[in-house]
Amino acid sequence: MQGTVQDGVDAVDKIPVARIVEALENPGAPYQHNGMDRHFPQIRFVWWAGGANFTHHQDTNRLIRAWQKPELVVISECFWTAAAKHADIVLPATTSFERNDLTMTGDYSNQHLVPMKRVVAPQYEARDDWEVFAELSERWETGGRERFTEGKSELQWLETFYNIAAERGASQQVTLPPFTEFWEANQLIEMPESEQNARFVRFADFRRDPANFPLKTPSGKIEIFSERIRSFGYADCPPHPMWLEPDEWHGNAEPDQLQVLSAHPAHRLHSQLNFTRLREQYAVAGHEPITLHPADAQARGIVAGDVVRVWNARGQVLAGAVVTEGIKPGVICIHEGAWPDLEPAAGGICKNGAVNVLTKDLPSSRLGNGCAGNTALAWVEKYTGPALTLTAFDPPASS
């Protein structure tokens, strides 16, 4: 959910983040969410902190157009991402190497508590988010900094969080050392394994005695059919699990169109590290790889290593061909997360191969309003145009 503040009131109106473009396009328009009638807010100012919207959001060209609607866009960012390049003001934020922090590791177990000590001082004009918000609070009103920080320094806030964790640990017979000792030792703390957790069975009490330990559903039982969802009358979300025809797939494709899958990348985390040397290990002909079946490649005169153009009504991208039997005929795959790099002089083609230039921006359903951009339709051909210089990772020209 994306929060907005209206009319100078502290109350926050939330909208599904996957519908941010619709909100910008249609301020005040009605929409449905989880059985509720709601309206998109009037958004005049956007402050984007965390999350690469120009990479993760679908239909990049539509997003670019909608992003012109707010009067001011500010972004907190460490790097010159596409989102930063589309902001009016960029606040350089520190990386994890330039600030103190705490973290948990261990996937879902959260078995390790780790001190994250600053390695180097903030470079150039970069500032911690904490410092940025504290100073802005003071500019907003006299005494705002003190109100925001509650009189605590950055390290004192980390100690506060640590002590809360220590109190919760003590309730489970886990003893943590004093914060000063933990911070100076600079070593992770491994929580002891719990024999009780090892024997955990989900919904065990319900399975043993469903009458006295009901689930948090209207019936207290596992529901395959939801009467509540049925009452919403959503054609895009029936009250029981079933297959619904995708908006775009090979079942409604036009001649020669292929189904585009936008899978998670194996070589990076979404868009993170796309700008690093790691890219050299997977890029094909300088572009994001596109996987296609030999039959589809042969029909289009494409061989492994070729630069191909992939396009539909929403946009076009360049990608490097990977030909393999490991994908079904009629289907192609471009991993999500490439930084968009549109070339106005060449019809707006994305030189880096950002798949969301091709995907359609529509909600998963009116129930959840999630992202539904994992499949689209597009045409593919061998690219025969001029070589285009990749600029996705270049900073903007200095004024």
Image (cartoon, rainbow, N blue to C red):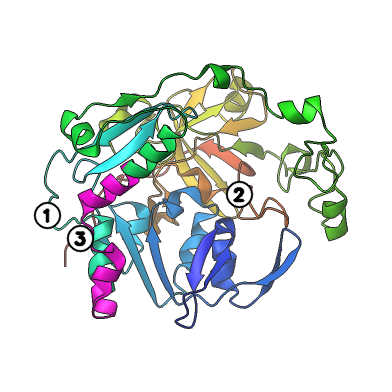
- What residue is at 16 percent from the left and 63 percent from the top? 398
For the residues marked 1 and 3, what is the alpha-carbon distance in whole angstroms? 18 Å
Tag 3: residue type?
Ala
* Marks 2, 3: nearer the viewer: 2
Drawn side of residue 252 relative to residue 179, left or right? right
Q: Which residue is mark 1?
A: 124
For the residues marked 1 and 2, what is the alpha-carbon distance in whole angstroms? 37 Å
Q: Is residue 4 above or below residue 129?
A: below
Q: Is residue 250 above or below residue 156?
A: above
Q: Is 160 part of what is drawn in magenta?
A: yes
Q: Which mark is residue 397?
A: 3
Q: Quadrant of the N terminus?
A: bottom right
Tag 1: residue type?
Tyr
Q: Quadrant of residue 104?
A: top left
| Front residue of this view, candidates 163 and 328 | 163
In the image, the segment drawn in magenta is: 138-162
- What residue is at 46 percent from the left and 34 percent from the top? 171
Badge 3, how many Cα within 10 Å: few under 14, some, many 20+? few
| Front residue of this view, candidates 174 and 101 | 174
Q: Secondary structure at mark 1?
A: loop
Q: Earlier in the sequence, mark 2 or mark 3?
A: 2
Drawn side of residue 84 relative to residue 316, left or right? left
Q: Which mark is residue 15?
A: none
Q: Earlier in the sequence, mark 1 or mark 3?
A: 1
Q: Which mark is residue 371?
A: 2
Give residue 129's position: percent from left, percent from top. Answer: 28, 57
Q: Is 38 part of what is drawn in magenta?
A: no
